[in-house]
Amino acid sequence: MLKFFRRKKPDPAAAPEAVAEATDTAAAADTASVVAEAPAVAPEVAAPAPEPAPPVELEPPTLPAAAPGKPGWRERLRGSGFARSFGGLFARNPKLDDDLLDEIETALLTADVGVAATTQLVEQLRRRMKAREFADANALLAALRADLVALLQPVAQPLAIDASARPFVILTVGVNGVGKTTTIGKLARRFRDEGRSLMLAAGDTFRAAAVAQLQAWGERNGVAVIAQGQDADPASVAFDALQAAKSRGVEVLVADTAGRLHTQQGLMAELGKIRRVLGKLDPSAPHEVLMVIDGTTGQNALSQLRQFHAAVNVTGLVVTKLDGTAKGGVVFALAREFGIPIRFAGIGERPEDLRVFDAQAFVDALLPEALGG
């Protein structure tokens, strides 16, 4: 008796290569069934099955680099919690009254601006509204924008490389998972594009993948990486890297460190050791202690910075992942409480998306341009 096999029809919505592969597979199955039912004539040795082709690894899709200037900031931050909170607020409350101020206060708190900064901003607007300084809600929106820019302007200070310090040592710190090693790779790309000679120190010896990741960034950018492997003493790595950078006349040395929770006192003390060891070779090193902060962290970023600042005297901040689900308001809270310069902001995955922090562009990207915007 002949056996019939139901052929699986290829999905017409599939890619052409997938359709062709499905058709060929079905045809091969039909042929095999007919051969199986034919009378045996002579025993044959089955041919070995072809080896399957190795899977092709594709790079995950990434957005193109953000547009230069303010358009790029607005494009990448329009999905943030801050921008969404204010998107329709002025459209819902065109009337200039206390209800509008209450909604502004709620939106600021929801966007992680923090109680202290929010109270300060709303009370300033309330006093000016009672003094009849605003003709309409549009004028109040303009005042809010100006107040937010004024809050950030003092900390919007680009990183300046001191040419007399050779090498200029940047020590990067932060908690686990904030994008510290990736930020170092992007900084390497920026410094290389500026024509600076530099070196990287793979001081995150706790996580083996971190050393490999930094070495990959070094190869991609043509930058030397000093490493000793997993579980090596981070202070020893930093010391060797500074010695090598001095002997080669390198302009910038960027040292990675292991991510650690700010509550882990032993690991926080290790950062102090790294700083002291660097100081033995160069009393002024590190010249910049750059803390990387995840923009999605919220108000917990304040306690993180407080502990790291006490341990190693943080001199600059990088706020990453602002293009994702970050609310963005924590930037204002950090600026108000600490006044530490914000050097860079991450608004995308590509190296070009690590932007020098621009207070005006940042605020313009978060607020609607006009009433009902």
Image: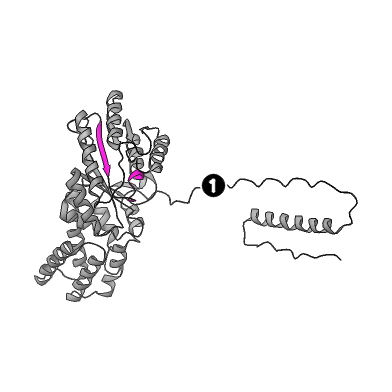
Residue at the image position 38 percent from the left and 42 percent from the top: 210
Is residue 168 in sight in this rendering? yes
Query: Looking at the rendering, in which quadrant would you find the N terminus?
Result: bottom right
Q: Is residue 91 or residue 76 the one in the foreground?
A: 76
Quarter-of-image position of residue 296: bottom left
Query: At label 1, which amino acid type do we have?
Result: Glu
In magenta stretch: residue 257: no
Residue with the mark numbered 1: 57
In magenta stretch: residue 174: yes
Q: Position of residue 77 (x, y in %)?
A: 33, 57
- Name the side, left or right, on which 3 lies relative to 321: right
Please tell me whether residue 278 is drawn above or below residue 257 in the rendered image.
Answer: above
The residue tagged with tag 1: helix, strand or loop? loop
Residue at the image position 35 percent from the left and 36 percent from the top: 193
Residue at the image position 29 percent from the left and 28 percent from the top: 245
Quarter-of-image position of residue 273: top left
Residue at the image position 78 percent from the left and 59 percent from the top: 30
Which residue is farthest left?
A: 131
Please tell me whether residue 259 is drawn above or below residue 108 in the rendered image.
Answer: above
- Name the side, left or right, on which 82 lies relative to 66: left
Which residue is farthest top?
A: 247
Q: Position of residue 127 (x, y in %)?
A: 10, 68
Q: Is residue 33 or residue 108 the one in the foreground?
A: 33
User: What segment carries the magenta color?
Assistant: 167-182
Is residue 97 in sight in this rendering? no
- How many residues crowd around disc 1 within 10 Å: few (fewer than 14), some, or many (20 or more)? few
